Image (tube, rainbow, N blue to C red):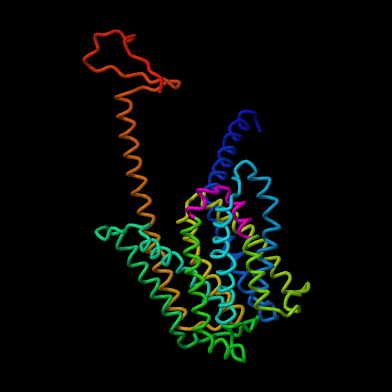
Amino acid sequence: MSRDTQTLEIPHISIYIMALNLMMMRYMPHALMILAQVFFTLLYFITEAAFNRGLNPYVYVTYRYLLAACILCPFAYFYEKKLRPKITLMLFLEIFVLSLLGGSLTMNMYFSSLKYTSPTFVTSMINTVASITFVIAIVLRMEIVDVKTLRGLAKIAGTMVSLAGATTMSLYRGAPVKRLWRAPIHIHGGGGGGGVDHVVAHESWVKGSLLALASCICWSIWIILQASSIKRYPAKLSLTAWMSLVGGLQSAVFAAFMQRNVEDWLVGFGLNFWCIVYTAITCTGLAVIIQLWCNKKRGPVFVTMFNPLLTVMVAVLAYVLFGENLYAGSVIGGVLVILGLYMLLWGKNRDQSEGKDEHQQSDELDCCEKQQATVVVSGYHFAARDEDDDDKAPETATMKPN
């Protein structure tokens, strides 16, 4: 091969490498968010199996948060040493409330509902968080809805459809979907096949639904509160570590009152132990870091868009591999919840687009006005000359400190 041919091939190879790098950077947030949903999907089946092996939900939440705090604290300490503000009494009280609403109270209710219902049901209920948050924001006058615009109507309609789906799932179970083949794996959870577990789950379905709905309401309040807390405590990784630590201690106090049997706290080194380790590392650790990074790169709407993927993945695996019955009420309600979520997200995304356009136009107008009126150089303010002063020398411009 001649030297000229080699020199022609090198630029082509570099172009391919650059194009591959650009494609990876463009779709890296998508791949990471899908990976996070895979982490959460496996979480539900592992925890359901662990609960059926005797793991107490309160003990599970306590160990999960305490272990996550031990993992996150070293990274938060060294990575955000300069960004982390000083902890005051009021800031600690704020973290205490955030840990209660976004951690101990919410997670204890949420995983207790998993014991009474099924993974498919609880993952479908998660999608109502956006709608509940929207309603609370309207009540608190933090959200303004323009009913004269299409995006405003989409947000209202999406919220109503999503809440209607949640109500359908909670109050109407319906007939089971006919199974065409035998599932290779049987967890025998709350939403599984026949037996005692199925009878208990059927009798406690409403109880589990109310627990799941209450956890989603607490989660929505937490989302509203943490939006303002981030401004006072911008170190997100450190805030997550603080909430894991405080939430674990809160859950420990609650679990001590609820479970006074010492044997419930001895998880051993079997499935129950690895369930806690997996959850702390992947779901409370890696998944949180992934969501924070994607939130910074693409925004909160992008992150929320992948939540329905979790519901679909859990439903397919539960039905195909783990022998869980799918009920008509869960299917209909889940479809309505996902449809309403995307309608709400579309309206919110249009709001952000309109806000960016208006902000950009305002910035351009301000920039033009400043260019016409003043020129700022090195901390000094130079008053611009009028068109009538064209016959004057440039030295006549006056200089004043800002």
- Residue 309 versus residue 80 in the image, above or below: below
Residue plotted at (51% across, 56% down): 226
**Quadrant in the picture for residue 356:** top left
Would residue 163 appear left or right of 54 to someone viewing this image? left
Image coordinates for residue 231, horizontal then vertical, percent: 50, 48
In the shown orientation, is residue 137 left or right of residue 204?
left
Q: Residue 264's image quarter?
A: bottom right
Residue most toward the right? 269
Tell me where the magenta segment starts and ends, as one range: 227-244
The dominant secondary structure in magenta is helix
Measuring from the top left, give residue 182's x and y in whole percent: 60, 85
Among all residues in the image, which is located at the extreme left?
A: 388
- Can I make out residue 207 in this image? yes
Q: Could you say where residue 299 lies in the image, as x and y percent from the top left?
A: 47, 52
Residue 37 versus residue 29 in the image, above or below: below
Looking at the image, is 288 positioned above or below residue 201? above
Image quarter for residue 185?
Answer: bottom right
**Residue 28 is at least partly visible in this image:** no
Provide residue 96's location: percent of width, then percent of height.
58, 60
Q: Residue at x 78, y 72 (%)?
A: 269
| Along the line of sight, the residue nearer the viewer: 222 or 377 | 222
Residue 46 painted magenta: no
Quadrant placement of the N terminus: top right
Q: Nearer the viewer, residue 176 or 159?
A: 159
Indicate the quadrant containing the C terminus: top left, top right, bottom left or bottom right.
Answer: top left
Residue 237 on the magenta span: yes
The reply, left or right, for residue 91 in relation to residue 339 is right
In the rendered view, tell whether residue 392 sits above or below residue 237.
above
Pick whichever, 35 or 158, lies toward us.
158
